[in-house]
Image (cartoon, rainbow, N blue to C red):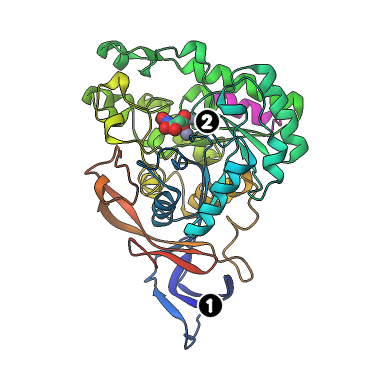
Amino acid sequence: MKTVLIKGARPYGEGDPVDVLVEDGVITDIGALDTPEDAEVIEAGGQVLLPGFVDLHTHLREPGREDTETIATGSAAAALGGYTAVFAMANTDPVADNAVIVDHVWRRGQEAGLVDVHPVGAVTVGLKGEKLAELGTMAKSEARVKVFSDDGLCVADPLLMRRALEYSTALGVVIAQHAEEPRLTVGAQAHEGEQAARLGYTGWPASAEESIVARDCLLAEHANARLHVCHVSTAGTADILKWAKERGTKVSAEVTPHHLLLTDERLATYDPVNKVNPPLRTGSDAEKLRAALAEGVIDCVATDHAPHAVQDKDCEWSSARPGMLGLQTALSIVVETMVRTGLLDWRGVARVMSERPAEIGNLSDHGRPIEVGEPANLTLVDPDTEWTVRGAELASIAANTPYEGMRLPGVVTATLLRGRITAREGKIAS
Ligand code: NCD
Ligand code: ZN
Ligand code: ZN
């Protein structure tokens, strides 16, 4: 296997630049190093070296909607965004609720070879919320499913959720909940607040999220199970998480880049590119989410990358599908909202983008320290350069980015998966 020498990088953005030698997929030396004859050299020029990012929440639309994203195109977007592992949600068509589908997704990811694609298994058969799927069979299949979720829909029945949590402990897996009490969001189009009222949209109240998060924290605590909360969007949820964690509940949570940056002020544009579930909330929610992420009350950033076809987005608000692209812009939004504001340093970025998601997703070979003997899953970041987002230029098939035309800081200049360069200077390495 190839030898790669990363020359002059600053691990975690700290200290003087060092050279990092990678052989056979492993970091074998760090210091002032000579260049081995056969080595491929990456001139890092003092850029920030981080452990490869891990996304706990990605929608790759294969099988079923390959017109919007495939495992291959989503993997390319992920590698370009600095990711070395992603968890692909189960709301495909057919649903990933059995070993055949999850193994198929896992193998397609390995064939693409750009990031490890870990399939998320559905909690209930067909995401119908009626009957538990065969979690054990999926956990023991070739894909070794580690995270289960009905994402897109909430496991609303408390008895089913309780059973799922009980099984998950026995299997050593985690249930990730899309917290949305469906009775409170019938016909909901946007965050229930001033903006929605002014524009005449049916409101999606904060309480629909918070009531499920509170309930699930209690269910998890009583079952002594682990719970992961998807895409936290309200200040109230952050308070509940803090309370639960202080009580010793084994709960973890993620926030999306868009909920850190964007607010329901965006509704005034009437552009459905801003329609997402949960909806964009208020400025004070976003502020609170940033603080909760910095504090560790929210554990990590997950993209909820949700590609949609033009015809499903470029239409009337009420008929548009919710969701936005995220893989190639996540790092930049985190730099903008968390690093430039002084809320996180690069150690903190490594924690929320790589280490914590790897731990929550039970990955032993990602989110590891940048040390000799560790797997070379690495991301090199130019922290100062800005770039302009163009949906059409992103690797995804769909182009529904809410950041179109925005200038953002932070460029991923190289990604390495087990010592192999997967992305370099904005291009997929072949
Ligand atoms: C997701 C999708 O498109 O699959 N949409 C979204 O708005 N986030 C589903 C989900 O994450 O709930
Ligand atoms: Zn969801
Ligand atoms: Zn999702």
Residue bounds of the magenta highlight: 239-250
Q: Nearer the viewer, residue 370 or 327?
A: 327
**Secondary structure type for disc 1:** strand
Residue at the right extreme, as displayed: 170
Q: Amino acid at mark 1?
A: Gly
Q: Which residue lies under the disc numbered 2?
A: 151
Residue 59 placement (x, y as % from top left): 46, 40
Mark 2 or 1: the one toward you: 2
Residue at x-position 35% and y-position 12% = 202
Q: Is residue 316 visible?
A: yes
Q: Amino acid at mark 2?
A: Asp
**Secondary structure type for disc 2:** loop
Q: Quadrant of residue 258?
A: top left
Q: Taken as a whole, is the magenta stretch helix, strand or loop?
A: helix
Q: Are marks 2 and 1 in contact (CB under 8 Å)?
A: no
- Mark 2 / mark 1, whichever is N-terminal: 1
Q: Which residue lies under the disc numbered 1?
A: 31
Residue 133's disc is: none
Q: Quadrant of residue 276?
A: top left
| Residue 266 falls left or right of residue 114 | left
